[in-house]
Amino acid sequence: MISNQANAIVAKLTHQQAVLQRHIDRRQVLSNRYSWLRVIIFFSGLLFGAITFYTTALWISALVLVVALILFVGTLYLHQRVNNSLRRFQLMQQIKRTHLARINRDWTALPPPLQVDLSYEHPFAADLDLLGPRSLHRLLDSAATQPGQLRLFSWLTAQAVPPVATLTSRQALVRELLPRTLFRDRLTLQGQLLREDHAAWRPDELLTWLRERPNSGNLQPWVWILALLALLNWLLFAADFLTGLGAVWRLSLAFYVVLQFWHGETIAATFHEAGTVRGDLERLMQVFQRLERYDYRSTPHLQALCAPFTDTAVHPSEHVRRIARIAAATGVQGNPLLALLLNLFVPWGLYFAWQLAKEKAELRELLPTWLDCWAELEALSSLATFGVLNPQATFPALTNAGTQHSDPLFAVTALGHPLLPRAEVVRNDFAVAALGNVIILTGSNMSGKSTFLKALALNLCLAFAGGPVDAAHLVTPRLRLFTCI
């Protein structure tokens, strides 16, 4: 029965890959067509603009160039949408391909392992292959962000096992995530859009940016002063033009320009900061929107976990959207001529530097909570994905040793090694009658003693992380693990 379920999962993933490939092929053809269309519009606009310039009136030539520019920009926009869609389908296909690699234990096709320094003083992590190229963490990890990876790693390597209530709560969350494959895969996809390479996305740069220049809020008085000076410049210029008052406006304009240059460093720093994080903010907004808009009515535990995204007066994506818009507005500083004209008429750069400082101050307090919730969700999704891809996996029954007695104290049926391919797994039953019992495992060399002990310990790591285990049935109290192999 379990073998049939596993084969059905493989067949489904293979079919999904084929469907996604057809979508990719169609969008690739469409993208190529848009590329050629852009070239044709560009050179046609230049050609007909030149012909009309020499053969007709100037306004006709200008009209031709304007029409060509509009067509080119419209085509560029549509081309970008097609390319964005193409990338999403390619990422989703890669996610499905990675699922197959997890089922087949194809380590060469899995994402790179987490790179952290593992202490040799840890009582069990090194012996159990919890981290590394062929490790439990790499097999489970579907997180697209480093905080999600680290959260899962901390659960697997926790020396102090959480209370049973905490583990039961995690199990409830994983159970709710199990049938929601599309939700989990789309969450992974949105996270992967934040990455520029195969490495997991790190929020360090974004959090560092939020902590920088915390005292920029005192720009407000200067914004008002420069705004009033700009208005005075316009009024004096209009009075000079209409009534011949005199060039008094030149004095106020000179004072205005001096004040603008005085704040030039602040404006330049704001432009640099905004350009650095703008892309991350826009993609982060899409992740938050997905968590805000999901229907949690049938998943009460998931709804409680994602409350920071749904219970606020202003949704997280709206905070991020506002900063992204301000960052886009400061982008004109990259065009010296346009920036000069705008800042000559109004305090454009300083105003948006002030607005950005206000939004940063608010986001500085909120973003860590949202990122923590996302990391928790990614770690839980990794455990749920393991349960889906391994239909033989079940949730362990956790007991409180000393307060709730079971007979036997520890028992497991059809225990398997989670890192081995299905065809190589030899399943065993095992039990410990009571606390204080000592069991000596004997056998000839290469008979599988170490493999069995590792299978036992790895499944306990899964159980104490709150996930399903590779066994038909497992009952265990909270235990301290220690290995020396």
Image (cartoon, rainbow, N blue to C red):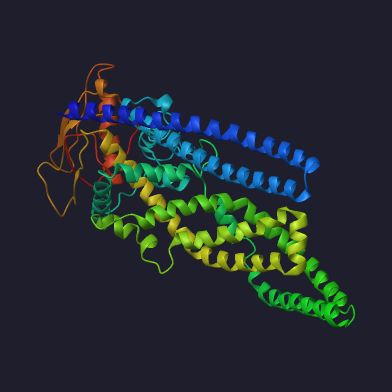
Can residue 35 be seen here?
yes
Q: Nearer the viewer, residue 320 or 374?
A: 320
Can residue 419 be seen here?
no
Q: Is residue 386 left or right of residue 249?
A: left
| Quadrant, the C terminus | top left
Q: Quadrant of residue 360?
A: bottom right
The percent position of residue 11, horizontal first and vertical second, equals 27, 27
What residue lies at 73% left-to-right and 53% top-to-bottom?
335
Q: Is residue 270 above or below residue 450?
A: below
Outermost residue toward the left?
407
What residue lies at 62% left-to-right and 43% top-to-bottom?
72
Q: Quadrant of residue 133?
A: top left
What residue lies at 36% left-to-right and 50% top-to-bottom?
377
Outermost residue toward the top?
445
The percent position of residue 264, horizontal first and vertical second, equals 76, 63
Q: Nearer the viewer, residue 468 or 10?
A: 10
Q: Is residue 201 left or right of residue 167?
A: right
The percent position of residue 463, horizontal first and vertical second, equals 26, 43
What residue lies at 27% left-to-right and 43% top-to-bottom?
467
Q: Is residue 50 above or below residue 300?
A: above
Q: Is residue 52 left or right of residue 468?
A: right
Q: Quadrant of residue 179?
A: top left
User: How many callouts does the rendering have?
Assistant: 0
Q: Nearer the viewer, residue 51 or 21?
A: 51
Q: Is residue 162 above or below residue 2?
A: below
Outermost residue toward the front?
56
| Quadrant, the N terminus | top left
The percent position of residue 443, horizontal first and vertical second, equals 22, 19
